[in-house]
Amino acid sequence: MRAERLFRALGLVDPALVEEALETRRRAVPWRRWGALAACLALAIGFGWLVTGGFGGYGGGMPGGADSGSSGGDSAGTATPLDPGGSGGSGVEEGITFMSYAGPVMPLTTAETAAGLTAERTVTWDFAPGAYSDGEPRQWGAAVTDAYVLRNSTGEDVTVTALYPFAGSFYDLSVTGLPEVTVDGEAAETALYPGSGSGGYQSASGLNVPYYTADLERLDSWEEYKLMLEDGRYRDWALGEAPALDLPVTVYEFSDFAAPHEKWPAATQSISFRIDPEKTRIFTYGIEGCGRDGTAFCYSYFVPDGVRRSSDLKLLVVLGEDIGAYTLQGYQDGGCDRGEEIDGVSCTVTRSETTLDAVLDRLCPHFKEMYVDEWALGLGESFDVLSSALFRRTAGELLYQYSLCPGAPVDHYIEGRLDDVLGDVLSQERVIYLSFPVVVPAGGSAEVRCACWKLPSFDYGCSETENVGLQGYDLATRLGSGLTFTSQRAVLDHAENVEVTQQNFGFDLEKGITAVDLDLEQEYYYMAIRVKDP
């Protein structure tokens, strides 16, 4: 399961959960985020790693050496010891299998033990019709209101830090925005605490190699969310202190580029050197290609021409022993093949000494601005919900987990591309917590409302499955919550616009039953709806 692999990376997994898998292939379980960074450094520069991939689809390799292989694409359904069924959609017990799983609506909880508090919950899915900006009708997703009445049976006011979890990626927030939270009718001041990327990594398309963790992977079932969240350790990670990455590094920055683009539009520059991989680890930013032949390494990039959509900021970051002497060479294109060297390619190389923390401090605002300005295609202002400080923190955690801690790096990051780390911060599915204070008066109550736009689970239109056209929604009644619930209720609003095809809630639209009380002993509810023709 993907959640088990995530917990292995966090050092949070119960050994009993993966003992059978470990018998198949023993791997050290990475430690917690608070492990000694000195030990991280020792391990970070102690890898014997082989570069795969190359020039982002253009091919790569050392001049005069063997070309690197390439990897990428979607999963081909490869089974692994921790994922016996392979990748792809995963169902739920008595539920529905969807190819893209959006995660359940999860219950409110509190950071502290909420002694003396009870909760009544009502979740409403509103299927009122909407419209695209061009006026075309649509009905994709639902407005969800997750409402609570918190009651205090004690003789003193109770103040708690409420935590509202929701599933999604930072990119999703460009579409849905953050949940809007009110307490007793007043907008709450919230803080954002993202958890770790929740899916882990999987084998790339066509590579039937267990543990070849080249591609991003998503959680795709209710059970995996349950495994990840139910004991609270994922939440504790999200709320904990960020790791300090004050590791000394040497940075080589490339600037003042020149190349004969009129003759060679894909003119490329490489930097070649020799290192001991046991003593040196290389990270890059804005550099598209890499290759290795023994101890000889080559990194390369298309020379900026003011037209190509790529970063003009290009860094080579050295962790451990410095690279020493290096050679710069121009090539006709990104293949960097022997016999295709060209003259007229040049740059200025500036060497400096700093820390990995300082590098991330510089790169995160640059990447975010580049993503918003160049790639987000009009969605950019919605990324304001992700502050530069939060982006920086999340990037540092991802780099720490999967590139610096024992057992790292996963193959997805083995080339050391910080661009990939920063991009994955935006695209990885995760559980995010909204934190806000709630005061429940002695003998009284407080009303909390969390309203959001919920994207559905679905099957892709080209898949020709029986679920094409259906939208899936599900609900966790108590997952990860320390609240004592006395009642929970589910409601459909504007139900005349949809038909419910599968469910275990108990709605009966033909009889006008659009509100049902839920069994508190049942931890999971689901439904699939189909939008009626207008």
Image: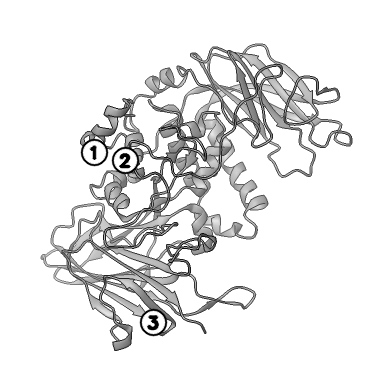
Q: Quadrant of the N terminus?
A: top left
| Marked residue nearer the N-terminal end (3 or 2) | 2
- Structural distance between the alpha carbons of marks 3 and 2: 38 Å
The quadrant where residue 184 appears: bottom left
Q: Which three-letter amino acid code belongs to the residue tagged 3?
A: Ala
Residue type at numbered disc 1: Leu
Q: Residue at x 53, y 62 (%)?
A: 175
For disc 1, the neighbor class at 10 Å (few under 14, some 14 to 19, many from 20) is few
Dot 3, crowdedness within 10 Å: few (<14), some or many (≥20)? some
Give whichever of discs 1 and 3 has the lower sequence position. Answer: 1
- For residue 4, the mark is 2
Q: Residue at x 64, y 51 (%)?
A: 375
**On the image, which quarter does residue 349 sit in?**
top right
Residue 17 is tagged as 1
Please tell me whether residue 422 is drawn above or below residue 405 in the rendered image: below
Viewer-side residue, 53 vs 14: 53
- Considering only vertical position in the picture, is 447 above or below 166? below
What kind of element bears circle 3? Answer: helix
Q: Residue furthest bottom?
A: 511
Check whether the beta carbons of the residues at disc 1 and disc 2 lie within 8 A of each other: yes
Question: What type is the residue that disc 2 sits on?
Answer: Glu
Q: Which residue is mark 3?
A: 495
